[in-house]
Amino acid sequence: MTIHNDSEFKSALDRLPVAEQRKLAARFAQSVSPLCKDSRVTAAIDAGLQPVVGDDKLMPFYNAVRGVCVESYTECGHVADWTNQAGHFVAEAAAACVMPEVALHGANPAWDAAMRARLARTCASIANGSGTDTSEVENQYHLLDDYLNE
Amino acid sequence: MSSKALAHGINAFVEQIDRPVASFFNSCVHCGMCADACLFYTETGDPKYTPIHKLEPMRKVWKQNFTFWGWLAARLGLSKPVTDSELEEWEPLIYDSCTLCGRCSLVCPVGNDITYMIRKAREGMVAAGHAPPGLKGATIRAVEIGSPMGVTWKTVQAQIKHTEEDTGLRIPVDQKGAEYMVIMSSMEIVNFPEYLGSIARIFKEAGISWTICSDATEATNSGIQIGSSDIAAQLVQRIVDGAEKLGVKYVISPECGHAYTAIRWEGPNLIGRPYPFKVIHILELLDQLREQGRLRTEGTETARMSFHDPCQLVRRGGLVEQPRRLLKMVASNYVDMPDPGIWNWCCGGGGGVSANDRADPLQLRVFSRKKSQLDDARVETLVTCCANCRIVLEDGLEHYQMAIPVVGLTETLAKHLVTAPQETAKTDADQGEG
């Protein structure tokens, strides 16, 4: 494996063009997709896995998945349900992979999706009582390695 | 409800009528200007949302107990006492349609602090058993668990660990003698953990000595929102105890509106003594660092950006220029919305409204004001510095199908932070155990 830490991980992601960052974002989101059952999230991840598509094609997926993100926020003063919160971060990871270029403003969709996917895994591990599952980090290094070696 | 609880509630109203409240009722000239300042009146046109009208049960108690003619009329049976059904009818007016935003107090021509009066009226309402179930639940969790959202220290630790991995920086916990103690809202732990990562990065570059206190992470104060000074004092005391234990010089209030009101402005009065430390809002600190050249950014956002002023921080807290100076560091196309700064319109979810599900439809309806502000200024990205505002704004934007991203100010600055060479960061990460 050529990726050993986040510094190498981020540098490698930054070297990729946006279209490839988007594909990797979709892979990172896909890895945690079982934590969210919403079909709008699955559709967004599937769209992100497709070959290069324009903003006009991405926008409906982005708008739909942003709806999931907003609906799944835990509002102020409400009990945090960590299983739902895991789903929220999966939706945010999915949103990163279909975010139209006009809205990116220099952001790296793959890095954003990776961080959101890790949060989803953390929330799921809080929900099951352990709160310390960091397996997603290694998994993401492998996913990037595999992608770079394809 | 029992007559005993009603009597308790009425007594609580009587106790809350201090000299300011009595003089405010006495000096109200019924001009109606507070109506035009209130989001809930302007967006619905319903006169029941006139701020001073929301205080009618309290006004009745004042008149019957503190004025000669009112007292006489009550004794002669010419005016009826406040009933439980009256309190029940007024509960949504006091809790669902008031965000304690303070705009009514700002416009009152005779200087009545109507927000202060609503806050006092809530004390009577909660004593009489009339508070929204959602807010009651949040308050119970704040007392019993330490967080209105049920966030435990174990959960905070999990998010700290995530942040350490994300940033490569150590998050200091229970460091005695640190200069600054960071407190957070549960919203930042649950929904916006990037806040913690952002301050960790900024503080590292600025050379700030800081810590989190494991006994006092929570900044929010449900006691303030529901109207229970006893509970509010208990929640403030936890932070004070934590800060005193660690011997910090400053407590940093986070991106949360009412937390700032609670810990900065009401706290010392609630616990009955001055603090041995200072409270500073995160934006005040960041603005100081900017001025000292310790907060440096690079690059700018090109989108047309605007700032939503959280009522408790800006109108009621005085942080008007700091967020604008900070945002202009990274926004090349900044624009104010109509009625900026102290005149800003509330998001519609402050003062405990967002913890109250019953108020959801009304909250979305009054968001029409924010929509028109955003439309007028043709805003492309909205920045704010209150986690609750942020979610209420996102909810409203989704409802009105407006594709405007909402971001936190601290994380926006962190995104553009000029960082030290990589080796330094690695060294710091290597030392970290969290």
Image (cartoon, helix red, strand yellow):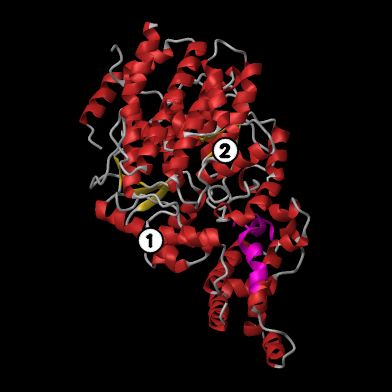
Q: State whether the magenta stretch is mostly helix, strand or loop.
A: helix
**Can residue A23 be seen in the rendering of this structure?**
yes
Near mark 1 (Cα within 10 A), the count class, few <14, some 14-19 or many ≥20, is few
Please identify the residue farthest to the left as the structure is shown.
B431
- Tag 2: amino acid: Val
**Can residue B292 be seen in the rendering of this structure?**
no
- In the image, the segment drawn in magenta is B87-108
Chain ID, mark 2: A
Question: With respect to residue B386, does B2 lie above or below?
Answer: below
**What percent of the width, then of the height, locates residue B98?**
63, 58
| Residue A85 among magenta residues | no
Q: Which residue is mark 1?
A: B144
Question: With respect to residue B317, does A120 lie above or below?
Answer: above
Who's the residue at 68% across and 34% down the image? B401
Question: With respect to residue B363, does B196 lie above or below?
Answer: above
**What percent of the width, then of the height, locates residue B343?**
65, 47
Who's the residue at 57% across and 69% down the image? B130
| Residue B100 among magenta residues | yes
Pick the front one: A124 or A15: A124
Quarter-of-image position of residue A69: top right
Chain ID, mark 1: B
